[in-house]
Amino acid sequence: MKKTSRVLLTILTIAVFISACSTGSPAAPAEPEPQANGEKTGETLKIGVVSPMSGPGATAGKYITNGVKLIEEKLKAEGGLLVGDTRYPIEFVYEDNEAKEETTTNVYQKLINQDNVIGIVGPDMSKAILAAGPIAQSAGVVAVGTFTTNEAVTQVGDYIFRACFIDPFQGRAAATYAWDTGYKTAAVIYNNADAYSKGLYENFELAFTELGGEVVEVQAYSGSDIKDYNVQLTKIKAANPEVVFIPNMFTEIPLQVRQARELGITAPFIGGDSMDAPEVAQLAGFENIAGTAYVSAFSPDNPDPVAQEFVKAFNDAYGMNPNSNAVLAYEATMMILESIKNAATIDRKGVRDAMASLKDLHLPSGTITVGPDRNPIKGAAILMYNAEGVPEFVVNVNP
Amino acid sequence: MATILSIKNLTIKFGGLVAVEDFSADVQEGELLAIIGPNGAGKTTVFNMLTGIYKPTSGTIEMEGKNLIGLRPNQFAANGLARTFQNIRLFHNATVVDNIKMAYTLHSLEQFFPALLRTKSIVEQERELDIEVMRLLKIFNLDQQADLLSKNLPYGPQRKLEIVRAMMLKPKILLLDEPVAGMNAVEIDEIASLIRRIREKFNMTIILIEHHMNFVMPLADRIKVLDFGRTIAEGNPAEIQRNPKVIEAYLGGGYNAIA
Amino acid sequence: MTTFFQLLIYGLQLGSVYALLALGYTMVYGIVGMINFAHGDFLMIGALSTVFLAMAFMSTSGTLSALQVIAIILIAMIGTGLVGVIVEAVAYKPLRDRPRMTALITAVGVSMFLQNFPRALPFIGPNPRPFPRLFPLIQYNIGGVTITSTQLIMLFLSLLLMFILYYVVNKTPLGAQMRAVSMDKDAALLMGININVIISMTFFIGAALASSSGIFYASIYPQVDVYMGGWLGTKSFIAAVLGGIGDIRGAMLGGFILGISEIFATSINSNFGYMIGFIVLILILLFKPAGLLGKFSIEKV
Amino acid sequence: MKIPKHLSKSVLPIIGFAAIYGLIMLLKSFGIANNYHIQILMFAGVNIMMTLSLNVVNGFTGQFSIGHAGFMSLGAYGSAIITTLLLKPSVIPSSMQIPVFLLSLFIGGLVAALVGFLIGLPTLKLKGDYLAIVTLAFGEIVRAGLRLIEPIGAARGMIGVPTYANLAWIFTFVALTLFVVRNVIYSRYGRAWIAIRDNEIAAEAMGIDTTRYKIISFTFSAFIAGVAGGLYAHVVSFIQPDTFSFVKSSDLLVFLYAGGSGSLTGSIVGALLLTALPEALRFLASWRLVIYALVLIIVMLYRPKGLTGGYELPFLRIHRKELYEGAADPTVPEAEEGE
């Protein structure tokens, strides 16, 4: 090998590291100087937003980013977040975690040490925040998971919060709804490679049998790469249940619904909150999805003014209804901003303490209070797809 | 002179086709047996059977009374049969020295875990080996190229290296498959003298495939002639040269290599 | 018994998908001698472009006529074929005489690019899209065993394509040249064969095949996104090797066996199905070390 | 003054490693480097070990494994089970934590090695792509298996693995791996592997028991992968089966061949660069992986033998001349320099 190219190689290596080391400018505490209206300008506060922008999870990433961008625009217009008589410019740092744990830990380290953010929104997947949570915990930075419904998430430490409800509640909600609607027998098809899907299934079965129902058939498949569910569905058809529970990813559900209908399974479906994506209806076909109910963090038909205001803003900005991903990202961000407002001292510790005692915060999905286990005490809505593939509000489920 | 290798009625079929039929020979210690014959006569096939690469359909190979049929090639080598290849098969991305050291694997006593830590004893064994290899290389004056990658050697020395590598196995019999194929007169003489040196220095028993007559004749003690897989003649060089069958086979085969 | 045949049909359905993909895969391998990890992404391009083409046609007339469907399929196949040719020319050609691993890694890079480039494009993006129905869906019921028109079409087409490909490679002058190239490039060159043209042709056919399998795949599992090709590519590689890589009939057989074994494994126990599928694969290879139809070539010594 | 060669050979690299580590710590104390960079380095370290492990099988023995993530996961789970379930930090005195950690790594390695041996025994007679498929299948089987074992969290994965592994440990293990791999390469075993790689038929004819040496190579490689997996688990503190998917295996292949297979330096450079690059490209936002892919393609086009093109750092080579340093008769049997 030529000496020159060896030298070049060394240079390249160094170059890459230097560029990796390009430290984000630590926010310098600007001396607050009074403005015309007597307002002072505080130092810029940074908030990290972690979501999958590439990789199969990228769809969720778009909703999450859009949800947060709404707030960003609003704050820009207002010139920052007003705390007392001081306005703090807020800067959002969006990072891609490819829906991988490893990358998420890198992103957390970057946000905390490079951008020194005051708090982190996301990621949306339990597995990702389970891997990265300890970093935020040890660094003492508030992290608010958006869609991280796995119980264990907030047990990582007292700096880890979430904006969503947890699997046991969701599974119970689905079971209760099924039971109350009068279904006595249920079947389940779930992804045994996916903690979310598995967790929901287990909690559903627990609750449903407690209520007196019977789970007549349970079928599994391994991984989102599987696209053929005929075998599992044939067995489910044979068991002839009154309802089928499909607690799976929104990319998997449409094919399951389609294939089930093609096999002649007429029983209605119930799904988890991941079903709350506009794509589901289009992909599954309206005639197939009609009558399918799911547990959702949020209903666009929610008459509450705050909710309606949010839905309108989202529609104006992106020409579509927000889904749970967007709502939860929005709410997680609001939780951080609110905590900054309530914070005794505007620093990471202060924000954490303030968030631990958040009470009656009025958000699109309802009024939330952060419980002792750092899970928001909040209800869920049951939605059902109508013949036009539009989810309609059915009933509210309260904790 | 004792028989060290006795081959009886070796026959091999590929599909229906008989490649070699009833090949028998008793190889005497220290002799040089040459197997000649036109292309496609099945000479290399015989070698492949004698080194375990092909399993004969029938027949026996006994090395000092031990039956070798069914053993794997490396076990043939372990029993003292070392070969070279018609189409050179060196370890091309290794240096000349390493090529030869690789043929010593069989005899090496290096243990795995000491090797991991490269203990003193490993270093000593490696040094001993290196000295031995360099001595060998000197004998065949390849020592100047010791640290070259074998693929960077010229053609002639590559063939030479293959022979030296086979010698490193400390074999009882050396099988040379067309050692002078594609060489010029000078190189051929060099190989010839090399073979002579091997014979007197190590009293090595050699089986040699070649159709280059004026190379074989002066070297061989005994010659077997193959044609279409059958042995058509056997005897010392003088007899073979006079044998009409052989001449027929060669001329019939359009062969003009007869001196 | 009916369940058995029902499962068999599902197996054949899944198998025909793998088989179709494996065909192009094994052909490229057999002739160019490289593992094209991007093959699965050609499938994605085929399916995705079909979605857009269908949209375009639909925008004019609400529905698709049989003629339009054929047109769409042909355009998609040709388009993908050209992509294949370009990829080969840019990323593989310069490495033709290099160790095959080099080309393999380039292929990984190409695959990454083909997935992430459209994803990053605003008008395509990561969202999965519904796939238009190109073939009418009719269900037949034979003695309790249901079989759909799509399944029949898939089976028929995969067999048809296999025979066409087999004919092209073994009976036509082009095929003869292809085989010559696959055996010995230099010799082929001396025979006055333009290797570059032949290899480009090979990639064209390979990619076109992949694209067609993408279309049929999406017709059965009507959901398309930029990542759909990744795992399928791997599966088709497995199928091709299982059948004896480089062997067209082998690829077919491998595909079907893979599909059928997966389906039956799942029916034994849906929890273990995935695992059993791979165990079967290993067992087969232990007993047929060169794949089902591949025979051990005795190396010239 | 001049340091004697055999000393410089053994001591300088250690000093070098220590120096680099010291430098990083210095940069950290100045706030130039921070935990972000340190973590990237730790992942890079683990990847270097994985790439070296793959290099033993693919690069030196010339086999074709594409399921190495399987061994990694075995090591990761093997060691995590010990430190998280059996001897968790809460139940052992803090003085025992490090010994337990090291023990767990060792056991993780053993588990991987054992499985490597068992899977290699029947399958290593397979050639090329057929072996590749088997290793791939093996990786998937391990992954699918781990998903179903409830006590270790099944698909949920293992939470709260103690973060014992810090940069110092990673450095130590990378150095150790380099040391042993180099040594074994320049011994009877390494030579046998290279012989098999360069020409299997000739290797057999030269009395090398190819099957045996392939299995040794496979098992050794699996052990390294297992230890690397163990380290990984104790860096991330959370492992779940899908972390060790085929994607991981193919990443490793990329590191190996982009760096330069058959060269230890290549594994270092490949893993180091390609682990850092995606992070360095963050400013490209959603175009990041597109550019990464292009860079990869260009690298392979312009350096088909990998970035290092077979070059080996001095302390990762052992020239036969060194055999005679400090020997009774230090005269090297003369031979001119080659290459």
Image (cartoon, coloured by chain):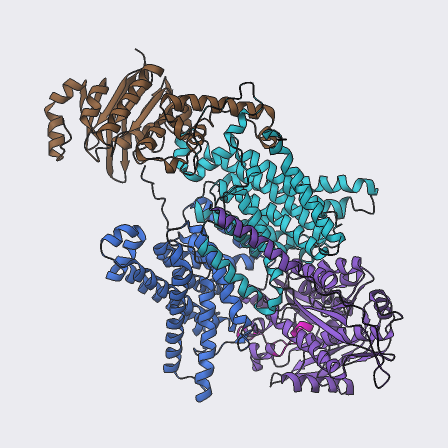
Name the residue located 31 percent from the left edge and 36 percent from the top edge. Answer: B87
Residue D80 in the figure: left or right of residue B74? right
Is residue A9 depicted above or below A392 in this figure? above
Image coords of residue D15 (percent x, y): 67, 38
Residue A110 in the figure: left or right of residue A279? right
Image coords of residue B6 (percent x, y): 31, 19
Is residue A234 depicted above or below A305 in this figure? above
Specify the chain shown as brown: B
Residue C245 in the figure: left or right of residue A362? left
Q: Is residue A284 visible?
A: yes
Image coords of residue B72 (percent x, y): 41, 31
Range covered by the magenta-colored residues: A259-278
Nearer to me, C79 or A296: C79
- Please name the color used to draw chain C: blue
Q: Is residue A231 visible?
A: no
- Please name the color used to draw chain D: cyan
Nearer to me, B121 or A44: A44
Nearer to me, B47 or D197: D197
Specify the chain shown as purple: A
Q: Quadrant of the C terminus of chain C?
A: top left
Name the residue located 64 percent from the left edge and 78 percent from the top edge. Answer: A292
Residue A276 shown in magenta:
yes
Residue A275 shown in magenta:
yes
Is residue A66 depicted above or below C82 in this figure? below
